[in-house]
Image (spheres, helix red, strand yellow):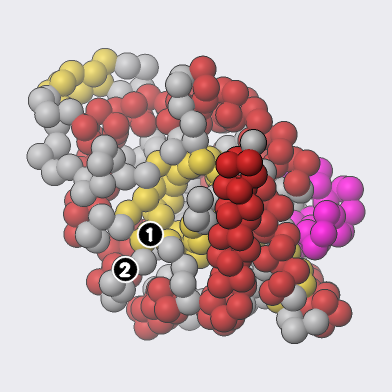
């Protein structure tokens, strides 16, 4: 089974070591960023969502016009757009992008973040709403006749969309969330269940739970894990670079008066911090210091080493059943280009060899 490699672009240059500067939207940067991913061998690009950031939907609409083949992943939060309208917008974007869209549905791990956009539902209620929302979207995308809906969160009559996604039966549904409430929604709806860069033991545990929950619904999701690879030509130089990244990130936060972060309500954030509590370096090359510094926010754990070492570490996750990897760097554009030189080709070669070994084992059994 081949792997899918996902990158991430934003509307301007920013990261833990690059404070936001200038305009919120930099068209040239987005164009160069998207094209760099396409040229570096990525399969898909995530465009994230934040309550104060430029529209992810419109960023993808633009990025699709300056690329040819790379696919996209839209971060989308249920609750701010009616599901009937969202279904039509997503299907339309899939049409205009030539069938290159996937959507990552995020119910929200922070009350404060949600309330900026007027959403005052509590954590578990948000996941219950997402369940209803996704059920509606899938019907709008696939049904040929209008239908009525009268649920807890949404009510409409004769909902329908003339535009359907290029991809059938619908665009790929990515889903994140590690709480019990989230896992039940993932079991019912996720085509790809996405988690942040946890330890091997943590990933083994949660993917086992998701598989079991999904089996109840007759479903078999795929799995995605996110990391921040820190590469160099030698192991020692890679760890020197990691130490420099940590110092830069800490200095930027100190200058802005931002304390070391506490965990969000997000169970995913708590899981990253639980990993960090076990040590700064876990498994082969997993590095947790940035996650600890920023309170487990977003995909903030790293894999540190040479391209060979990091590719080998990713293969361990592949052996657990992970077939999608989201990799992004602390130097966003430069690292995307760097990953394409050696890391991505090496990982694809290792996966192909592992598949050959597994096929041979199955034939011999």
Find residue 87 and report its horizontal and vertical position in percent.
25, 40
Give left or right: position of 33 versus 156. right
Answer left or right for 76 relative to 324. Answer: left
Part of the protein shown in magenta = 270-292
Residue 307 falls in which quadrant of the image? bottom right
Q: Could one spot residue 93 in this view of the protein?
A: no
Residue at the (58%, 75%) spot, across then down: 339
Q: State which quadrant residue 140 falls in.
A: top left
Along the line of sight, which residue is nearer the eye, 26 or 237? 237
Secondary element under disc 1, as helix, strand or loop, is strand
Question: Alpha-carbon distance for marks 1 and 2?
Answer: 10 Å
Q: What residue sits 75% from the left and 84% below the top?
A: 233
Residue 171 lies, with reference to residue 31, above or below; the image says above
Residue 245's place in the image compared with 348, above or below, is: below
Disc assigned to residue 69: 2
Q: Nearer the viewer, mark 1 or mark 2?
A: 2
In the image, is residue 69 part of the stretch drawn in magenta?
Answer: no
Q: What residue is pinned by disc 1?
A: 72
- 284 and 161: which one is in front? 284
Give the class, few, some or many, for how many residues have Cα within 10 Å of label 1's Cα (few <14, many ≥20).
many
Q: Is residue 143 visible?
A: yes
At 46% from the left and 35% from the top, the residue drawn is 190
**Does 287 appear in magenta?**
yes
Quadrant where the C terminus sits is: top right
User: Which image quadrant is residue 11 in?
Assistant: bottom left
The total of numbered circles placed on residues is 2
State the image coordinates of residue 234 (x, y, percent, origin top left): 80, 82
Q: Position of residue 169 (x, y in %)?
A: 26, 37
């Amino acid at each position: 089974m081949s792997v899918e490699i996902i990158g991430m672009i934003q509307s301007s240059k920013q990261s833990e070591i690059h404070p936001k500067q200038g305009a919120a939207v930099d068209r040239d940067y987005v164009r160069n960023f998207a094209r760099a991913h396409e040229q570096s061998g990525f399969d898909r690009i995530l465009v994230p969502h934040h309550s104060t950031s430029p529209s992810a939907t419109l960023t993808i609409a633009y990025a699709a016009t300056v690329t040819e083949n790379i696919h996209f992943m839209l971060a989308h939060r249920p609750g701010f757009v009616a599901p009937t309208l969202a279904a039509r917008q997503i299907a339309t974007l899939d049409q205009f992008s030539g069938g290159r869209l996937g959507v990552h549905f995020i119910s929200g791990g922070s009350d404060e973040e949600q309330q900026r956009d007027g959403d005052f539902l509590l954590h578990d209620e948000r996941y219950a709403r997402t369940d209803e929302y996704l059920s509606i979207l899938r019907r709008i995308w696939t049904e040929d006749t209008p239908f009525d809906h009268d649920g807890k969160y949404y009510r409409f009559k004769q909902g329908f969309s003339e535009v359907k996604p290029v991809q059938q039966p619908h665009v790929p549904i990515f889903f994140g969330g590690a709480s019990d409430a989230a896992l039940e929604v993932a079991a019912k709806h996720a085509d790809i269940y996405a988690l942040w860069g946890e330890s091997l033991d943590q990933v083994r545990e949660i993917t086992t739970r998701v598989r079991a929950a999904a089996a109840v619904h007759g479903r078999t999701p795929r799995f995605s894990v996110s990391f921040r690879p820190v590469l160099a030509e030698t192991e020692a130089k890679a760890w020197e670079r990691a130490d420099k990244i940590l110092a830069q990130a800490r200095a930027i936060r100190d200058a802005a008066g931002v304390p070391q972060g506490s965990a969000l309500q997000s169970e995913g954030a708590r899981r990253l911090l639980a990993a960090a509590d076990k040590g700064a370096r876990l498994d082969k090359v997993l590095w947790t210091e940035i996650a600890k510094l920023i309170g487990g926010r977003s995909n903030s754990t790293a894999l540190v080493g040479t391209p060979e070492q990091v590719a080998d570490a990713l293969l361990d996750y592949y052996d657990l059943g992970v077939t999608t990897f989201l990799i992004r760097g602390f130097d966003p554009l430069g690292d995307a280009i760097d990953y394409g030189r050696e890391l991505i080709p090496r990982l694809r070669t290792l996966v192909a060899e592992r598949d050959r070994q597994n096929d041979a084992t199955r034939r011999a059994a």
